[in-house]
Image: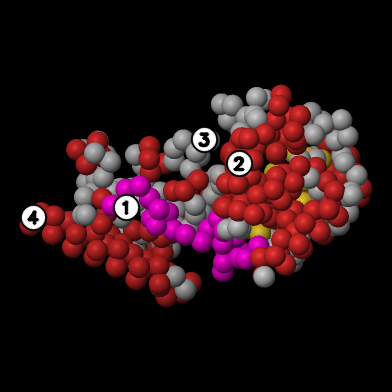
């Protein structure tokens, strides 16, 4: 009964959105798929996958396909702050267009410094006009940490010499929904690492409006597009964890679905890169994998058209979707529980557990380490 009510509500919302004017009158998502050799069957398989990823019943698959066809009804403004553009490249730099990247191309992208042709005065004008024209209707996506307070001048953008924080505040004020794309925008990222010379802050510290964090360095294209589709579906924020991350994407640990998990449980570990254990695909915990402490769906969704991800390629997870990962997860090639309490600059997760409320993480780390040691001991005895 509850699913029937949700289905009716979603269908009603999609029907309402379909009445909004198309921004790209001469192009449809189906035509775009055909141009790139993607069949309707493949599109529906993708829609079924997205439906499952958002933890919805399979009956919602036709509605997911309809939502994808309506993404151009909600214009998108994408701002770049202090970052490397890796989050944009997660969508754009593929060896062949994926359905996710084609949908991103189909979105009415009103402003994106990396892909738009305009620059200088024209680019600034485009941004101002988009905010005015689609006030209260557009989706705002922000990539990168943001220098704040007396340090805002470290990020000065455009011919007017406007600060990045000003751009973010102005765009956020009139947005229908706001997404912090990537760890830098979600939590400050590398820019905010100690000693944080530019006083970089996450987007949520720049605006008082609700911000959905989509962390990762970079996040997968499915996590980016999935949040857009979720908003089109429901018009509300998804269920969020304590760090404002959508639970449908960040509700499980990397460790939970890792293909090397069986080796961890069996006490079979890579002791150093290039050894026999590495050749046999053993667990990477002892060479620094932070998968047991990192919440993300990389082990399920992967990257590069679902072909691979860092752990499959032979390097442990570095915990990039966690707050302050640059300071708390390093050194990246050493187990978290085996670090000294006085880490670099004395501000690691171990050193500040009693001050910033991550004691649970430290306890978990010790527990993971103990489990690894016991299983390794049992294996040696056998």
Mark 2 or mark 4, earlier in chain? 2
Classify residue 242 as left or right of residue 101: left
Given contact means CB atoms under 8 Å apart, are the residues at marks 1 and 4 in contact? no
Mark 3 or mark 1, earlier in chain? 1
Q: Residue 222's spot in the image, x, y percent?
A: 59, 45
Task: Please identify the dominant SS of the magenta region.
Answer: loop
Quickly name the residue at label 2. 46
Q: Give the residue at x 47% y 48%.
A: 300
Mark 1 or mark 4, earlier in chain? 1
Classify residue 305 as left or right of residue 278: right
Please tell me the numbered disc located at residue 261.
1
For numbered disc 4, what is the local secondary structure?
loop
Quickly name the residue at label 4. 382
For numbered disc 1, what is the local secondary structure?
helix
Query: Alpha carbon of mark 3 to alpha carbon of mark 1: how far?
Result: 22 Å
Q: Is residue 286 visible?
A: no
Q: Residue 200's spot in the image, x, y percent?
A: 62, 55
Query: Alpha carbon of mark 2 to alpha carbon of mark 4: how far?
Result: 46 Å
> Vertically, is 346 above or below 357?
above
Residue 8 sits in quarter: bottom right
Question: Along the line of sight, which residue is nearer the eye, 183 or 354?
Answer: 183
| Mark closer to the observer (1, 2) | 2
Query: Alpha carbon of mark 1 to alpha carbon of mark 4: how far?
Result: 20 Å
Query: Alpha carbon of mark 4 to alpha carbon of mark 3: how far?
Result: 40 Å
């Amino acid at each position: 009964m509850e699913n029937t009510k949700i289905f009716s509500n979603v269908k009603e919302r999609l029907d309402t959105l379909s009445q909004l004017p198309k921004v790209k009158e001469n192009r449809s998502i189906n035509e775009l798929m055909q141009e790139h050799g993607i069949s309707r069957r493949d599109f529906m398989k993708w829609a079924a996958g997205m439906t499952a990823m958002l933890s919805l019943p399979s009956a919602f698959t036709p509605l997911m396909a309809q939502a994808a066809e309506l993404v151009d009804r909600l214009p998108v403004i994408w701002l770049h702050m202090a970052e490397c553009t890796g989050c944009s490249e997660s969508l754009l730099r593929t060896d062949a267009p994926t359905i996710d990247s084609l949908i991103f191309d189909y979105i009415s992208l009103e402003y994106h410094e990396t892909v738009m042709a305009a620059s200088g005065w024209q680019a600034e004008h485009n941004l101002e006009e988009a905010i005015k024209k689609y006030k209260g209707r557009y989706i705002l996506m922000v990539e990168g940490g943001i220098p704040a307070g007396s340090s805002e001048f470290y990020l000065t953008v455009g011919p007017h010499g406007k600060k990045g924080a000003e751009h973010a505040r102005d765009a956020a004020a009139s947005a229908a929904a706001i997404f912090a794309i990537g760890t830098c925008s979600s939590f400050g990222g590398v820019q905010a690492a100690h000693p944080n010379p530019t006083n970089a802050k996450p987007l949520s510290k720049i605006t008082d409006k609700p911000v959905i964090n989509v962390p990762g360095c970079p996040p997968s294209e499915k996590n980016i597009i999935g949040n857009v589709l979720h908003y089109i579906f429901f018009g509300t924020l998804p269920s969020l964890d304590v760090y404002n991350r959508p639970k449908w994407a960040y509700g499980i640990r990397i460790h939970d679905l890792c293909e090397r998990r069986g080796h961890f449980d069996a006490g079979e570990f890579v002791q150093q890169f290039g050894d026999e254990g590495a050749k046999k695909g053993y667990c990477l915990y002892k060479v620094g994998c932070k998968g047991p402490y990192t919440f993300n769906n990389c082990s399920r969704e992967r990257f590069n058209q679902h072909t691979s991800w860092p752990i499959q390629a032979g390097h442990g997870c570095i915990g990039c979707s966690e707050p302050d990962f640059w300071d708390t997860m390093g050194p990246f090639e050493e187990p978290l529980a085996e670090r000294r309490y006085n880490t670099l600059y004395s501000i690691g997760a171990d050193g500040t557990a009693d001050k910033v409320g991550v004691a649970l993480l430290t306890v978990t780390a010790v527990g993971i380490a103990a489990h690894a040691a016991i299983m390794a001991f049992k294996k040696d005895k056998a």
